[in-house]
Image (tube, rainbow, N blue to C red):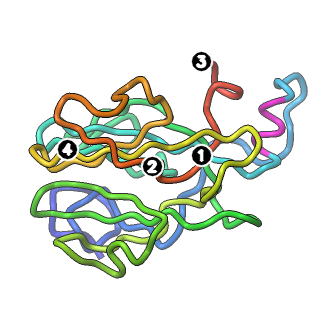
Amino acid sequence: MPGPGPFPGPGPFPGPGPLPGPGPFPGPGPRPTPGEPEEFGEFRQRNLVPFYRYYNPTITDHFYTTNFNELGFGRSGYRFEGIACLVFARQRPGTTPLYRYWNPTIGDHFYTTNFNELGSGAQGYQFEGIACYVFPTQRPRTVPLYRYWNPTAGDHFYTTNFNELGQGRGGYIFEGVQCYVYPTFPFFGR
């Protein structure tokens, strides 16, 4: 059922689309390709997928998805900013869901591993589903996914690069480590 908003997608909301579960990685299957870097074979064996990052300057919203087809290289006002990190498409031992919410009033996507933070929807946020699976605690080769909030712009922002905003700047307040994910650089360059 199409959403009432300007975004194409299967969801009943004006965001890029609800997620009953993580979207498929549009790349090749899990078999290693002859000659590919060893790390990329490991990437596929672990069932990791890119967590794509987008930004919409009109509504000041950062959006993240494992489904590249939701927004591709950018549409509906969203600009593609690259791959934020690597996450799991399916639950693996030791992982927890990263839940996705959308607040149409302030134009903000919110992600949390704590379902009780907003439950099935609260404070104007609508529950959209599970974005992906992540680690709640540090594991070998994982890095923190930092969470920020800009109350003036009404925007949550997530990054593995602490130097992007540090303890907070540009109106963003540092809220802490949301979860742990795999960095992109072993697989996609620095």
Q: Which residue, given by chain and number where applicable, does mark 3 sit on?
A: 190
Magenta residues span 39-44
Please identify the residue farthest to the right as the structure is shown: 34
Q: Nearer the viewer, mark 3 or mark 4?
A: 4
Residue for point 20% across, 40% down: 77
Q: Is residue 144 above or below residue 14?
A: above
Q: Quadrant of the C terminus?
A: top right
Other-residue count near label 2 (Cα within 10 Å), few / some / many at <14 / 14–19 / ≥20: some
Task: Give the mark nearest the N terminus, 3 or 1.
Answer: 1
Question: Circle 3 sits in a helix, a strand or a loop, which is it?
Answer: loop
Residue 113 is situated, as x and y percent measured from the top left of the image, at 49, 64
Q: Is residue 181 above or below residue 110?
A: above
Q: Which amino acid lies under the numbered mark 4 shown in the image of this protein?
A: Asn
Q: Is residue 161 above or below residue 61?
A: above
CA distance for labels 3 and 4: 27 Å
Other-residue count near label 4 (Cα within 10 Å), few / some / many at <14 / 14–19 / ≥20: some
Is 42 inside the magenta-drawn segment?
yes
Question: Circle 4 sits in a helix, a strand or a loop, which is it?
Answer: strand
Q: Nearer the viewer, mark 2 or mark 4?
A: 4
Task: Give the mark nearest the N terminus, 2 or 4.
Answer: 2
Q: Which residue, given by chain and number where applicable, does mark 2 sit on?
A: 69
Q: Which amino acid lies under the numbered mark 1 shown in the image of this protein?
A: Pro
Please identify the residue farthest to the top as the structure is shown: 190
Residue 1 is situated, as x and y percent measured from the top left of the image, at 30, 76
Q: Which residue, given by chain and number where applicable, does mark 1 sit on?
A: 26
Task: Give the mark nearest the N terminus, 2 or 1.
Answer: 1
